[in-house]
Amino acid sequence: MSQEQNLPVGIAATDPGVGRSTMPGILAEAVSRYGPAPWLTYGGETQSFADLGQWTDAIAAALLAAGVDHDDGVALFMGNRFEWMQVQLGIALSGAWMVPLNTWLRTTELTHVLGSSGCRVLIWDSAVLGQDMRPLLQALVPELDDAGPGAWRSGAFPRLEIVVGVGDGPWPRGVTPWDDFLQRADEIDASAVGARAGEVGPESTGLVIYTSGTTGVPKGAMLTHTGIVDHMREWTRHMRLGPHDRSIMASPLFWVFGCTMNTMVPLLAGSMTVLEERFAAARFLADLEEHGCTHLQGVPEQYELALNHADAARRDLSTLRVVQIGGSKTVADLALRIRDRAPDARMLAAYGLTEAVGVNTWTEFDDPFELLGTSIGHASPDNEVMLRDPVTLEEVAVGELGEICIRGHHVSRGYIDNPEATAETFVDGWLRTGDLARADDDGYFTIAGRRSHTYKRGGMNVYPAETEVLLGTHPDVERAAVVGVPDARLGEVGAAFVVLAEGTSVTAGELLEWADGKLARYKLPAHIRVVESLPVTASGKVRKFELQQRWSEESAEAPPG
């Protein structure tokens, strides 16, 4: 594709003033305003905002040529690379909505996501982090071997009609290779892309992001264009980012942070992002120094690994001025270590979840430094946060424990194809997060626990119910309960307490081997303990806090090493 720095025809037809609350609108504004300035660096190559406009224009035109319409969903299974953000914004220009697929998921989980979302198009990366992903695609859609593009039909996914393969082949007969797909853009007049983009309204669905729930079934949160764009505009203002800034990102783009913060913030700020394929401490440190990164966005576990790496001492980190450090229970010591290497860095803690576009409370840059280790900050200006009794849903008093509930224009309109979960989670206009907290007189919140017993493994939310359901399918397992327990490297990992069926003798090691490959690796327990029984309430519910207490006591008694 041409690297000319002119505004693409399709983008030019989208009036930036009209669509300021849509992804096509802020894309047009960014391409017009920042044109030749660097937008993204990946793998030693840098692209400008003008390049982004050209690529997204072509992708949108190809989607239109394929017949994609406003009501269509496009699923993306891809590792971190240039094309990820280009595809997301191209889908937005076409008027369709995108489902980012977690590349760590496997057949069972992906089957549910593709089935419940009802996507018409699937764009698939041939390899992610060096692993061949084509066999997984064939396992999901075996009919691709039956006929050429457009001539096959999927039994599991009746609405799926188009599969596009990105990267090296060979591909099954029914897959359209990426280059062939892009050539279809020539069939569409460029002004048609702008016309379609102009039809995208603020309340149109832009993303459907799947997040697991307490039932163990992934749920697709529907996020609108205005919810994504306007909330990220508020976040960009809060971080005070501008065209002079350079962000570095090593987390997966399929996370809500990836497809909201990392895609939207550069468009709103005119800043550049250094994108890593994956987090690797040595590479991360080298790129941070080489590009003079000013903004660090990731999870505390990554920062710990980077600071502990042998190369850390010789790398210059002094250019950092904004560091997001929320997401871990204990970050005060880490914050001090970062400040020691980057004296001008200003740090903030934050809290949020997928259903509310990823960030909903935050601290201020001039807050006392100690707050970083204890507080998640106050409600962002564009949403309300209320602590409510988890049973009565009445607002609790200052200092009392309550469930965090969020209300705002950016909160998801509900879960796709899941009215039951929608009714349970979105109550009277409020999003029930399942997280418990206390508020002080200044409106600052402190997390106290999780109603749903979720835990975070290396920054990834893990819902024990999903793992418990899997373990319960083993013929030798009578019942299983999973809790989060402390881990020096990952923050928290899963510990499964398993009661075996009478007359069986499967070992913990055998259970771990059996479970491998059935769920994403981060969802599998790091530890399994076979126990005689589980502590339960009178109604039969597992008292998980007792299991966590038992783990702590037994770990303390265990000899070191």
Image (cartoon, rainbow, N blue to C red):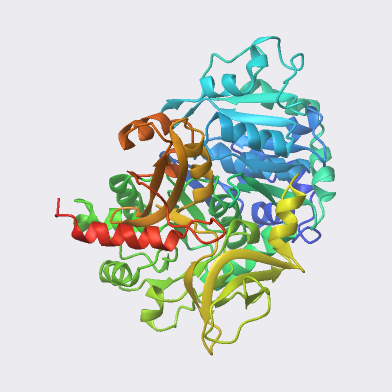
Relative depth, front residue between 25 and 424: 424
Name the residue: 49% across, 44% down: 468
103 is higher (above) or lower (below) than 17: above
Residue 550 located left or right of residue 403:
left
Residue 132 located left or right of residue 504:
right
Name the residue: 71% across, 41% down: 91
Position in image of residue 142 (x %, y %): 63, 16
On the image, which quarter does residue 386 sit in? bottom right
Position in image of residue 409 (x %, y %): 73, 66
| Residue lying furthest bottom | 441
532 is higher (above) or lower (below) than 108: below
Q: Quadrant of the N terminus?
A: top right
On the image, which quarter does residue 296 sit in? bottom left
Relative depth, front residue between 424 and 474: 474
On the image, which quarter does residue 154 sit in? top right
268 is higher (above) or lower (below) than 523: below
The answer to whether residue 415 shows anywhere in this view is yes
Name the residue: 32% across, 45% down: 283
Position in image of residue 356 (x %, y %): 64, 61
Residue 393 located left or right of residue 474:
right
Relative depth, front residue between 341 and 462: 462
493 is higher (above) or lower (below) than 99: below
Name the residue: 53% across, 58% down: 271
